[in-house]
Structure formats: C-alpha cells, structure tokens
Image (cartoon, grey):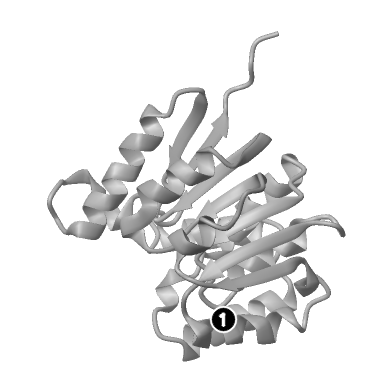
Amino acid sequence: MSLTPNNIEEYCINHSSQISEVARSLMNFTRSEVHGSRMLIGEMEASFFKFLIHLRRVKKILELGTYTGFSSLIMAEALPRDGEIITIDINPHTTEIAKKYWAQSPHGKKIKSILKPGPEALSEIKEEFDLVFIDADKNNYSYYLEWASNHLSENGFIITDNTLWSGKVLQAGVDKQTDSIREHNQKAFELAGFTKTLLPIRDGIFLITRTPKEN
C-alpha cells in the first residue's frame, strides 16, 4: 500500500538508484507466485534503505520479518564486504525462497537466517546492532521496539515499517493489529533520549535514532 500517487512514486523510483537484477527477479517472483506479496517493501523503500545504510555506514543489521528475503537482500547489497544481517522469521516456505535467491547474489553470504518466533529468537541475542528493521508480527511491535532501543550501537537506529497501516492508525479500536501499531507509534514518540520521525513513505516508516549527547 502506498500513500503517494502511483505516478509520483514511479517517477521517484525511476530517478533513484536501481535495485539489482537478482533483487528484481525476487520481487517479481514474490508478486506473481507468493501469497501476501503486499508485505514486500517497495522499490522506493529499497532505495531509501540503501541510502540510509550508506549514510550511517551501517555494518550490522537485525531484521524482524524475512518474508521472501527481498529487504534482506536489498540491505545486504548496501553493506560493506564484512557487513552482516541477521534476519528472523517463522515461515520455512518463504525462508527457503529467500535462501534460493540469496544464493544467486554475491551479497547473500552476508545474511544469516533464524527460523524462530521473534521474541524467542531475540531472547538469545545479546549483541548490539547499527540498524534494527522491524517488519514482523504487528502485535509484538512494542516489544520489538523496546528490545531494539536497548540493543543499538552508539550511532544505531531503528526502522519500523507499516506504521500508518493504510491510514487505519488514525482511529483507535479498529482491530488488534491497528491498536498494536498505534501503541508502538506512541511509545516511539515517548522514547527518551531518541530523535524520531514518522514518514508517509509507502505504508509509513518510523525512523528512530539516539539523540547525540552534548559535548
């Protein structure tokens, strides 16, 4: 879902850095053959993510929600040679699709897949990350946000996807997922020591980063 008119988004995509052939093949396969393809990040997000990863010189990423591995591959392509992504999901079918396409890319070796429920997997991870991308089960968004805010490197940041949820977040009580996203958005807004911006890119992207300490 996109809140931007299609022709405007297409113009922006056409004037941004393009995705790789492997990533495009994976995107097209997912859209034509895999249930729930609306869960894919779009090409506009892909360009934006790559820009942020280069800008912040990210080396270590945690991703919550692998799906068919498109976003994992996009981010891996932006990482330096010694960069790493840990991506977590519970669906073995879509994860196998992801691994098939990662294997076709020289950047696939940067990606490590964990097949477990998000909270269970996170309980076993102790290290810090330069970027945590939250795009998994919406009802755990607040938990993922809290975990991420406590596992960021000094210059690390968080990206949470689908934070406008087709505009449904404007009203409380629509359904459980919407209320869970609303709760996440409020908790993100209230996070002390962090700078935040909620952007109307595609279905809403929340950016959250530590506020630099004054000298």
Q: In terms of secondary structure, where does tag 1 sit?
A: helix
Name the image quarter holding the N terminus: bottom left
Residue beneath the point at 71% across and 78% down: 102
What amino acid type is highlighted by mark number 1? Thr
Q: Which residue is mark 1?
A: 95
Residue beneath the point at 50% across and 66% down: 65
* Image vertical order of residue 26 relative to residue 33, above or below: above
User: Most extreme residue toward the left, as rendered?
Assistant: 173
Left or right: residue 186 versus residue 110 is left
Residue 45, x across and y down, in percent: 56, 57
Q: Nearer the viewer, residue 16 or 11?
A: 16
Q: Quadrant of residue 21?
A: bottom right
Residue 106 appears in the picture as rendered: yes
Residue beneath the point at 60% across and 65% down: 87
User: Most extreme residue toward the right, as rendered?
Assistant: 81
Q: Nearer the viewer, residue 94 or 30?
A: 94
